[in-house]
Amino acid sequence: MNAAGDVQAQLGIQLCCNREWARALDLLDPLLQAEPQRYVARLFLGLAQRQVGEADHGARNCLRALQDARRLGYWRDNSTTPAWLRHYVKAGVAVVADFQRTRLHAAIARAREEQQLPDTGRIDRFVDGYVEGLLINPDDPRQQPKKHLIPGVPASPWIDTALLPWVSVLESNWDTIRNEFLAIHAGASGVESFLKFTSPSQIPRYLTGNGVSPSWDAYFFYRHGVRNEENCARCPQTAALLETLPLFRVPGFAPEICFSILSPGTRILPHRGDSNARVVVHLPLVVPEGCALKVAGEARAWHEGRVMVFDDTYEHEAWNNSGHFRAILLLDAWNPHLTESEQRAFVAVTSEIHRLGQLLAMGADSSA
């Protein structure tokens, strides 16, 4: 940065303070293109853009300014924000929040109209909490999702399978599913690590081994919502059965469906899931002695052919203390307490959240 740029930034900021938005844009826009690290000037650029009707650009620049400043330790609270700037930082936060709120509520409104949804109330409240950067306090403090908490949904670590009557289809087809698993396991084709590590040093954060190298592998039917056609073709009966189930489907995110294989002596360390919109379903296929799943402090053993369902926004862990591998069919399902209308509204909102993330981060225009 240079002295001439400092003067240009100060003039642009002063013009914003005087509400001369268009003139401020003429100074700040070319300055930020030449010197993008000026986060204070970028905040005022975003505020000016919002005032002249450039909502997308304004929200994006305010967000980037906030992120850049906080990365350097500034604007995190009043003690890290100069007194003269606090009002404008709050205004920048409001620009981003208002932009997100408008877009997300519009997404719900479109879904309500196009799909004739009768009730989306809990999803509306979820949006309000999301845009304020709040995780609405759960009824059960043990429940702490990493991303999304839909308020008002009954909370329980373990889900009664009676609430998901379709799990009987899994149980009645257990032999078929298990036989297809055993066939692919014998050849190991399509099996990969469940967790993608960029360095071996990451492994102890997620897995431990009882005197052995820990290993958690998977054979994916769906990964982040994308169907693995090759793997499905190798297990045609299981794949066909899965398509008959009311799975948790959110484009780009879910479902996650796999044969989950835990090697002997491996322990999956405590962790939490992203959202209480879904529950996790386990159909145990191969379960030796010494294997268990613990959710919210309560450990339960798997039993072959009997489905277990839990809410993974509670802290959970699993272990295989045996000398043989453990295998389950793992899949995502909708939380049974959500109505179909709420499910559709949630898909509309999370799809829009993904679009907004791309828009704010990459600079796409509103038609992207």
Image (cartoon, rainbow, N blue to C red):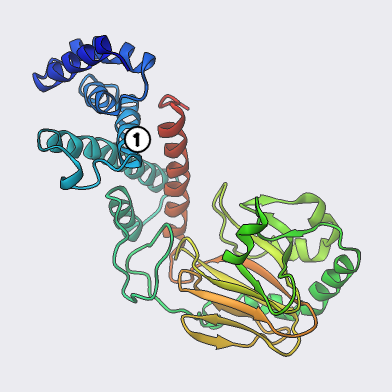
Q: Quadrant of the N terminus?
A: top left
Q: Amino acid at mark 1?
A: Asp
Left or right of 323, for residue 332: left
Residue at 33 percent across and 65 percent down: it is: 151
The image quadrant of residue 203 is bottom right
| Along the viewing direction, whichever of 160 and 354 lies nearer the viewer | 354
| Along the viewing direction, whichever of 233 and 198 lies nearer the viewer | 198
| Along the viewing direction, whichever of 128 and 302 lies nearer the viewer | 302
Answer whether residue 164 is visible to the viewer in this image. no
The image quadrant of residue 89 is top left
Q: What number of labels is visible? A: 1
Residue at 22 percent across and 19 percent down: it is: 52
Where in the figure is residue 248, as x and y percent of width and height? 56, 60
Residue, far bottom: 289
Where in the figure is residue 344, as x and y percent of width and height? 46, 54
Where in the figure is residue 362, as x and y percent of width and height? 46, 29
| Along the viewing direction, whichever of 218 and 164 lies nearer the viewer | 218
Position above or below: 189 against 110: below
Describe the element under mark 1 as helix, strand or loop: helix
Position above or below: 16 against 135: above
Left or right of 223, for residue 26: left
Residue at 35 percent across and 33 percent down: it is: 64
Where in the figure is residue 109, as x and y percent of width and height? 35, 44
Left or right of 152, for residue 115: right
Answer whether residue 83 is visible to the viewer in this image. yes
Say which residue label 1 marks.
68
Position above or below: 98 against 345: above
Position above or below: 350 against 64: below
The image quadrant of residue 183 is bottom right
Left or right of 262, for residue 154: left
User: Local crowd at mark 1 within 10 Å, few (<14), some, or many (≥20)?
Assistant: some
